[in-house]
Image: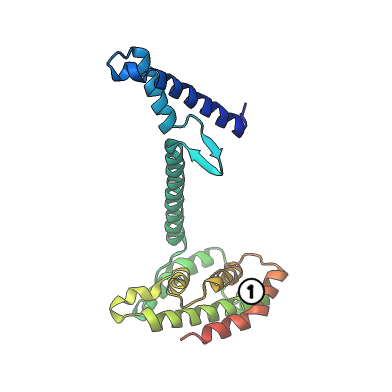
Amino acid sequence: MKLPNWFKIIWWLILLGLTGTILFKRYNAIVNGQSVVADVFIFLLFIALMLVPIFSEIEFFGIKLKKEMEELKSEIKIKLGDIKNEIRNSQMQTFNATIQGFGPPPPDNKLPELETEIDRIVSDKLKQHGVKVDTDLHELINVPDNNLQLFKVRYSIETEVRRIWEQRFFNEKDNYRRHLTISKIIDDLTKYDLLDKNFYGILREILSICNYAIHGEKVTHKQVSFVTNNANQILEYLKEIS
């Protein structure tokens, strides 16, 4: 049963008053060296009541008193929760980078070798199944207009965002940084106030819809309309940043 706050206060004051009264009456005996074991017990109890409130929370004249140990435990739990979340997020980012990160494209001098591999592996498999490659490429890569439109928006936004980043941060000595993810680039631009912090969330939502369409996921008509209706303003805003 949870006791009301006023009862806790009254009970605490009664205990303090009782132990204080006993100590006051025993003051002369204690000073004269005539104290007994009970005096020591009452004194320790009085100190405990003064320094460590026995209630988890007391409100007295608008002031809340809490046990420091309980407060410390609560803070530790919060910190541990934050650390667990950071570890989980780091693991997810590593997993996504491993699955989705294909690395930079092959150099031109390696393309003939790859083409030979395609003929050796893919063409042989098609021949085994009696399949002739005579279908027009445009029929095989037929992309819905909505997905194509969202790809164009994503491409245009990423081009502008990378332009801003390279003008401010790119160094030929750190060429590897050119291949940072678009998410990391947006984080950097926002961190250094090149992008408005309120714009950060809007841009990520726009790109998340575009990413779904690019990776073959279904997007709703409202999502497509939202992107196409606002992409013009988004791109004009980015073009103004130099």
* Residue drawn at (48%, 38%) of the image: 66
Which image quarter is the N terminus in?
Answer: top right
Residue nearest the observer in this picture, 154 or 86: 86
Q: Is residue 17 visible?
A: yes
Residue 149, picture quadrant: bottom right
Q: Is residue 108 left or right of residue 127?
A: left
Q: Is residue 132 left or right of residue 66?
A: right
Query: Residue 139, position in %: x, y?
Result: 64, 77
Three-letter amino acid code at disc 1? Asn
Q: Is residue 7 above or below residue 113?
A: above
Callout 1: 10 Å neighbours few (<14), some, many (20+)? many
Q: How is the image coloured?
A: rainbow
Residue nearest the observer in this picture, 161 or 66: 66
Q: Secondary structure at mark 1?
A: helix
Query: Residue 134, position in %: x, y?
Result: 59, 77
Query: What residue did someone put label 1 on?
Result: 147
* Residue drawn at (37%, 14%) of the image: 38
Residue 19, picture quadrant: top left
Q: Is residue 111 above or below residue 92?
A: below
Q: Is residue 155 left or right of residue 21?
A: right
Q: Residue furthest right?
A: 221
Query: Residue 64, position in %: x, y?
Result: 52, 41
Q: Is residue 14 above or below residue 73?
A: above
* Residue drawn at (39%, 81%) of the image: 168
* Residue drawn at (44%, 69%) of the image: 184
